Amino acid sequence: MHASSGLDHRDDIGPVKHPDLISRDFMRLVAIWSIVPAWLIGGAFLGWLVDQWLHTFPYGVGIGLVLGLVLSVRDIMRLRDSL
């Protein structure tokens, strides 16, 4: 067993990943799938608040959704680059 590789070599079934590596990959997947809805909901909510304040519905919500989409793509690209 090599501690640096993160893999155990077993003759009967081949290399097996350690549970901590599987959970790290799972958490990255969860992070990616949670970024988009979080930014979209947050952007729409902030846009709605601006619309309520300035009486400009639906423009603030639309701008908030577009900004949320742009920021979610930015965060996904940052997460991808950190891999």
Image: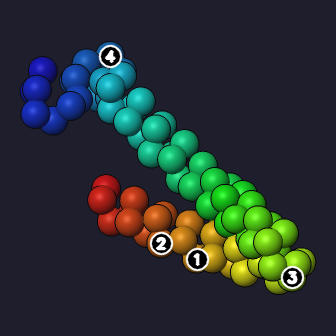
Residue most toward the front?
53
Nearer mark to the viewer, of 3 and 2: 3
Identity of the residue drawn at 11% across and 26% down: 3
Badge 4 local density, few (<14 within 10 Å), some, or many (20+)? few
The quarter of the picture where the C terminus appears is bottom left
Q: Do residues under tags 2 and 1 come within 8 Å of each other at their CB atoms?
A: yes
Which amino acid type is marked by label 3?
A: Thr
**Residue at label 2?**
74
CA separation, marks 1 and 4?
48 Å
Quadrant in the rendering for residue 25 = top left
For the residues bearing labels 3 and 2, Cβ distance under 8 angstroms: no
Secondary element at tag 4: loop
Amino acid under label 2? Arg
Secondary structure beneath dot 1 equals helix
* Circle number at residue 56: 3
- Nearer the observer, disc 1 or disc 4? 1
Task: From the image, state whether disc 1 or disc 3 is nearer to you.
Answer: 3
Quadrant containing the N terminus is: top left
Q: Earlier in the sequence, mark 1 or mark 4?
A: 4
Dots 1, 3 in contact, CB < 8 A: no
Q: Where is residue 68? Give x, y as percent.
A: 63, 70
Q: Amino acid at mark 4?
A: Asp
Classify 48 as above or below 13.
below
Location of residue 9 in the rendering, given as x and y in whole percent from the top left corner: 22, 24
Query: Which label number is shown at residue 12?
Result: 4
Secondary-structure class at tag 2: helix
Residue 70 seen anywhere in this rendered image of the structure: yes
Dot 2 or dot 4, earlier in sequence: 4
N-term-proximal mark, 4 vs 3: 4
* Residue plotted at (51% across, 47% down): 31
Front position among marks 4 and 3 = 3
